[in-house]
Image (cartoon, grey):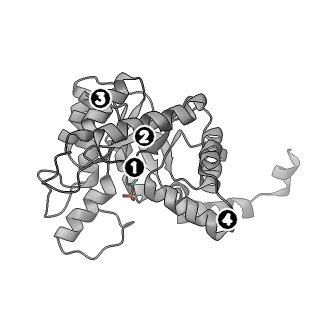
Amino acid sequence: MGKVLMKIFIDSADLSEIKQAYEWGIADGITTNPSLMKKAVNKCKLDGEDINLKGYIKEILLISKDTPVSLEVTETTAQRMIEEGRKLYEMFKEFGNVNIKIPINPSFEENNLTHFDGIKAIKKLSEENIPINCTLIFTPEQALLAAKAGAAFVSPFAGRVDDNLRKRSGMNFNKTDYFPMEGISKNDNGIVSGIDLVKQCVQILRQYNLKTEVLAASLRNTRQVREAALIRADIATLPFDVIRNMLKHSQTFEGMKKFTADVVEEYKNLL
Ligand code: E4P
């Protein structure tokens, strides 16, 4: 049984969010992806800032100190992902905490011939001691192959599994809505919810005592964070708002109002 408490990564490329999460003392790492980078770059442009992406990423790495930071490749063939992964790693190696995110399968459709290119890239880069976070995992068997290829982290995308199941059930939903871990009527080849996917990945990898850590990704609400911890995910990567919401409760606010109203002079004079 794992004795290390689930780690919390911040799923963001926004410098102010990252700074805040580290100042709060709760961040154990950072995950980024091309969409999060685009959002951060566009925000800087809107603020009239001239962004130098290399310098920007260095700032992220400085804030993160020695905690893991994932940077994702953008290429879609094994050879190009290997080259890009090496370059990214070399560029920021001095910080000692970069890992490279590789998609489990970079194909866009069934007929492509590149389904195993992610695995090839993971294997090659892992052999070169470049830590890999294997991303876009939607089945436990994808996680199994990524772990077998040497990935340091596997990232099952819980929220997107829930989106898919809700769409297939014809439900109207917001992405941040809670979806029960035990599922509803539909399943995706035996996966009943996003947290169920994370759970099955954890169960399989733990059985074999692998070093690969299960990083629960695409989490959109605090109850999913609780469930990720209940099923013993190694890591949960969270958007800034989810981290912020983890400490909020109406009864805590009420309790604070009452306690602060009840402080008697004698108590104050104690100090
Ligand atoms: C993390 O590694 C992923 O990039 C991220 O959690 C995806 O989240 P989303 O499905 O909310 O975009």
**Percent coordinates x, y for residue 5 in the rendering:** 45, 34
Residue 71 placement, left or right of 93: left
Label disc, if present, on residue 74 of the rendered structure: 1
Q: Nearer the viewer, mark 2 or mark 4?
A: 2
Task: Say which label, 1 or 2, has the lower sequence index.
Answer: 1
Q: Nearer the viewer, mark 3 or mark 4?
A: 3
The residue beneath circle 2 is: 84
Write the residue at 23% across / 68% down.
166
The residue beneath circle 4 is: 257
Residue 220 placement, left or right of 12: left
**Against 262, is 9 above or below?**
above
Q: Secondary structure at mark 4?
A: helix
Q: Which quadrant holds the N terminus?
A: top left
Task: Say which label, 2 or 4, has the lower sequence index.
Answer: 2
Q: Residues within 10 Å of mark 1 (few under 14, many from 20)?
A: some
Determine contact: label 1, label 3, CB under 8 Å: no
Say whether mark 4 is within 8 Å of ligand 1.
no
Q: Residues within 10 Å of mark 4 (few under 14, many from 20)?
A: few
- Amino acid carrying label 3: it is Lys
Decide if residue 214 is in sight here. Answer: no
- Amino acid carrying label 4: it is Lys
Decide if residue 123 is in sight here. Answer: yes
Cα–Cα span, label 2 and label 4? 54 Å
**Against 168, is 136 above or below?**
above
Q: Residues within 10 Å of mark 2 (few under 14, many from 20)?
A: some
Q: Nearer the viewer, mark 3 or mark 2?
A: 2
Cα–Cα span, label 1 and label 2? 8 Å
